[in-house]
Structure formats: C-alpha cells, structure tokens
Image: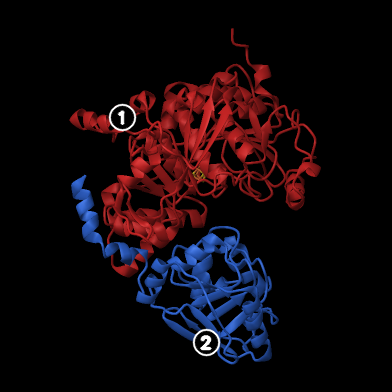
Amino acid sequence: MSKTLVEKIWDAHVVKSEEGFPDILYIDTHLIHEVTSPQAFDGLRKRGLPVLRPKQTVATADHNVPTLNQLLPIKEELSRYQVDMLTKNCAEFGIELYGLGHPFQGIVHVIGPELGITLPGKTMVCGDSHTSTHGAFGAIAFGIGTSQVEQVFATQCLLQSKPKTMKIEVNGELGQGVGAKDIILYIIAQISAAGGTGYFIEYAGSAIEALSMEARMTICNMSIEMGARGGLIAPDQTTFDYIKGREFAPAGEEWDKALAYWKTLYSDADAKFDSVLTFDAADIAPMITYGTNPGMGMGIQEYIPATGAQPEKEKLSYQKALDYMGFDDDSSLIGKPVDYVFIGSCTNSRIEDLREVADFVKDKRKADNVTVWIVPGSKQVEQQAKNEGLDKIFEAAGFQLREPGCSACLGMNEDKIPAGKYCVSTSNRNFEGRQGQNARTLLASPLTAAAAAVTGKITDVREMLTPNP
Amino acid sequence: MKKFTKLTSAVVPLNIENIDTDQIIPARFLKATTREGFGENLFRDWRYENDNQPKADFVLNNPTYSGQILVAGKNFGCGSSREHAAWAIQDAGFDAVISSFFADIFKGNALNNGLLPIQVSEEFLAQIFKAVDNNAKSALEVDLENQTVTIVETGAQESFEINPYKKSCLINGYDDIDFILNQKQLIEEFEQAR
Ligand code: SF4
C-alpha cells in the first residue's frame, strides 16, 4: 500500500494500535530544557519511577539563560533556580546535560541537528512547540505538554492518535533577497495562523528541494504557527551530506545501514494526503508582519489590509492588533523607524543566518537609532562565527554578538524589548507582549532585519543588493 | 491517579462564560517547579484585591458554597494551553467541572490529570444554576460508569459523553503512564525487534 512519509515513520514506531484507543507511539529522542521539565521530574519522584531510557534523553539550558557573561552566576532568581533544578534533576536521573559553559550548549532545536542527534526517520519530542524544526531531516518531531514529558520519561512512549496529512508544494525559483523565512511567512499569511490545524505538513516542490538544511529548518520550525502539529521534508542528498561526520551521527557500517533506510523515506508517488496546497516561489517577496499573530504578514512593498476588508466578526480583533502595533490600516510600512533588531531564535540563529547577515553588513554601519542584538543559536555557532571572523564584521557594524540562548524570542531572561518600541525580529512569534510587555514585534528574515539595522527603518532589502547578472 | 466512579457533592457555581486559562491561573504564577500549590492562586485576580485581601463577593470566598464540583458557563478553559489551569482547579479541591462547552486543550489536560470535565446542554446547565440559586447546598450526583449527572433535589438527569479510553482510565484510577507501563513488555519487545 502506498504511504506518505509521515505514515511510513509513524507506522514504524507504533508499539500497539488498538481500535478505540490512541496508538502507543515509540519515541526515539526526547529533548528537554529547564522550563517545562521540573514538574515532570517531580511526577516521576512521586511515582517512584526512573527515566526509562535516559540515554535517549538530552538536556540543555536555553529559555532562561542570560546572553552576556554566561559563566557568572545568573542574577535573576527564578532563572537561576530553574537552571539549577535542571542540573540537579539530570544528575539524579542520569541524563546528559549540555548546560551553561558546555561547548554543546544552545537552543534545544539548534543543537539537536548540529550534533547529529536529529536524524531522518526518527520520532522526536520536546516540551516546546517549535520541536517541529527537526522535521527538516525527515523526522516526526512535535512539541508536548508537561504531563507528556513525564509520560515519555517513564515509558519512552506517547499515546497519540495518527494526524491528518497535508502537502504544501512550493515550486519554481526564489527572487533575489528572498529566503526560507519569506517562504514560510508567505505560506502562513496565505493560509492563516490556523490554516494547518490538526495536520502534519510535508513540504515539497523544487523550491524546497533547492534549500540548504538550515533553510529547511527555518521552514519546518514555523509549521506550528499555522496550527499544524508538525512539519517535515523528505531527506535527500543535501540531508545526508549535512549529517555525515557530525558528533553523534552514525559512522562506518552504521552509517551505511542508516543511509539505506533513510533512502526509503519519501511519500510514495500515489500516496494520499488529506489536503494539498501549491505555491509559486516567484510570487514571494521579502515578507514582514504588521500584526500580532504570524499570519498577519505581507510582502514588504504591500499595504496593511484595510479593516473594512476583514470578516465582520474579526474586525474588532483586527483593529485591536493594529492599535497595539501603532499602525494604520491601508498604509505602507516602508520607511517606518525601528528601535531594535533581534537576529536569533531557533528560527534564524544558525551559522548560515549569521553569514548572510555578515556578508550584507560588511563595510556598513548600523543606524544610530537602532540597537542590534545577534544571539547565536548555540556555543558551536558562536565559535564558528568567531573562527570565520564574523564577530569582527559585526563589531565594526555596531552589532552586538551575544552568547547563545532563546533571549528576546520570548523575553524570559533580561533581553526584553521595552514597552512601545519596535523590533524587527527573526524569531517566530509576534504575540502581544512576547518580546517584553507592550513590545511591538515585526517578524522578518535575517536579511530584512539587517537592512532595517543599517537604515534604521523598514526597508526593502532588494534595493540594497547589487542585482544578479 | 485518583479513582473516579461516583461523586455526590454540593457545587461551586461560577456563572460566567468564556473563562480563559489566564483567569484560572495568571501567567505570573507559573514559575513554580512542582504541580502542587497552584490552588492558592486559582482565579487569583477575581478572588483577591491587589493587597491580597479576599474579595467578599467572589464565590470561592463565600462560605455558603462548597463542594468538589465547579459549575461554569460556556467555553470554559479557552486561551493559553497551560496545564497549570487543570492543576490549579484540582489543587483547590475540585474533582469535576461542569460546563456547556470546554476548550479542547483544557479538556485534554483535565482528563490527563484525573479532573473530570462534564459537558451538559445549555438547558441542563441553566437548571443546575437555578437549583443552586434556590438552595446553595443543592447537590449533584455524577455517575461516571453510566455517564449521567443528576440534580439530586429535582431528580432531573442528563447523560454526558466521554472517550471510552479516558473513561476507563478515570474509573480504574490510572493515567496514560500507568496504561503504557502496563504494556511495558510490548515496549521492550518493540525495542528488541528494531
Ligand atoms: S528560541 Fe524561542 S521559539 Fe525557539 S525554543 Fe527558544 S523560546 Fe522557543
């Protein structure tokens, strides 16, 4: 019988399937961090249970950590407490922890792939909704709640019903200055922040196949922002080349065996999806959001849609979003002054993102009115950036290269955007107060963010690039 | 998990629609690292003044009402997916919540924690509120086995839906973890067969 990629991986992990019950799904890898794990560990203690497969669990400290002077004691009491608790819990239950000061530390969704822990065909979960990032390798990866974290600790399994599947094809060639972040912001703007609810999405088509692994991660990362349970891309030569030689990737005979299996991981030609959508890459411009959910995005030259054009029962909340942002409907964002630029988060904090930004800002300087934070996704990304001299370029441009963590993506540490200020951010959520109380977030690609940093205002980056011959 | 079969109790009526999880447990109380103690801050901003003085007119501060059943208006538990909302209600001593509609994620979280969400019709919900209006000690009988809820005084009864798997979990007092651990051998066989 022909199967979709999701079905192939799912079926290979079903421990038990019984009519009237959810499937018992085996989980290969469980990633944890300091914020959503303490209650789960606490639950285990109460039941007197161990972590069933501690070797299949990997921990890091990322959500709460400072991005300056990481080796000094954490000033904020709650953050320090949660990070200490993680250290204690990992020691007690025998879990490997890449904590502060460890060369592998970083945002959970950045370190999995770069360490070769994320592999095609795996099932992976984490108490964080952007776990969908790992789907870029052709894995089933999704975020879970705290009770489920406890469930995976205790049983290495999850009770789950099989999701519906959607295929999103993007074909053709991207224009200059347009990248993976623009593709995903475009798709979400097209189908809305709830358009993928209940589905597992497979991204396909020539424009997706042409992307690097890091760009594919950016796409899968934001699947959750359209309500999907997860997103994935079939593994190919680009995937295999990326994995080979990484710290925990299979090697030698193991590699050959793994590779043979990975090559079977694709949706069969006549596999049935519950829904199929197709887009043309040529229609996509550099994107920017103007509202308070990731679906409120548009091409940077477009006008903010008129309130009058919204469905009757949404008019009020639409207007409320624009009021929060301090924008008028039916107006352009081009030329709007910006206060902060944040380049980071599990969406866009990998070495390619940093290289792209460095390449663009070389011999340029940031505008005086803007504060620029570059927060690498991991210690390894930070180190690599320094090895390549990117830190010097950033310094010369007036950009501050910080230490790794989630940082201003959710403002749980000190990196908060002040009330009322505008921040062009490469992260994934522009919810009210996400980056700090009353902070105003405009989601965009690293290039668009860099252009705003240099000009001090919202700018169409295409006007600053030398045209392709 | 605690077993749930039958429960006869007076109720705490909260006749408000669209109660979101931010009202149930405000974000600033999510910092704890255990599941316990959230009950103290259940409906915090409805229950207490800024200076921590209890608001006399809020139902949880009214000694006339007590019991293990919370009865609330339509669309209970909407908003953020925080599991802390279910923990807080349970920690405050409730074993069941009755409403004419529950937000999906809240319902799942409640069931995962042994808190029974009972969805009844608008009409039946109105009858419950009326019965409690007439007599604050008016009791309800919840029978999970037969999936019915009865207003003891009037004998009015309605049946409710529940997923058969979740029902067996509650009746037997096991949760997903117990359920899966019961099949531990299957898990080991699965691991070995790979
Ligand atoms: S960077 Fe942001 S979205 Fe990613 S894991 Fe951290 S908090 Fe979540």
Task: Specify few, some or many for label 2: CA neighbours under 10 Å numbering under 14, 14-19, or 20 or more.
Answer: some
Could you say which chain is coloured blue in the image? Answer: B
- The residue that disc 2 covers is B9
Q: Secondary structure at mark 2?
A: strand
| Residue A230 numbered mark, or none | none
Q: Closer to the camera, A264 or A154?
A: A264
Does A290 sit left or right of B118 as displayed? right
Q: In this picture, is B148 found above or below A346? A: below
Kindly identify which chain the residue marked by label 2 belongs to. Answer: B
Q: Closer to the camera, A286 or A229?
A: A229
Q: Colour in which chain A is shown?
A: red
Q: Position of residue B29 (x, y in %)?
A: 56, 64
Which residue is found at the position 38% from the left and 78% from the top? B3
> Can you see residue A107?
no
Which residue is found at the position 37% from the left and 43% from the top? A7
Marks 2 and 1 on same chain: no
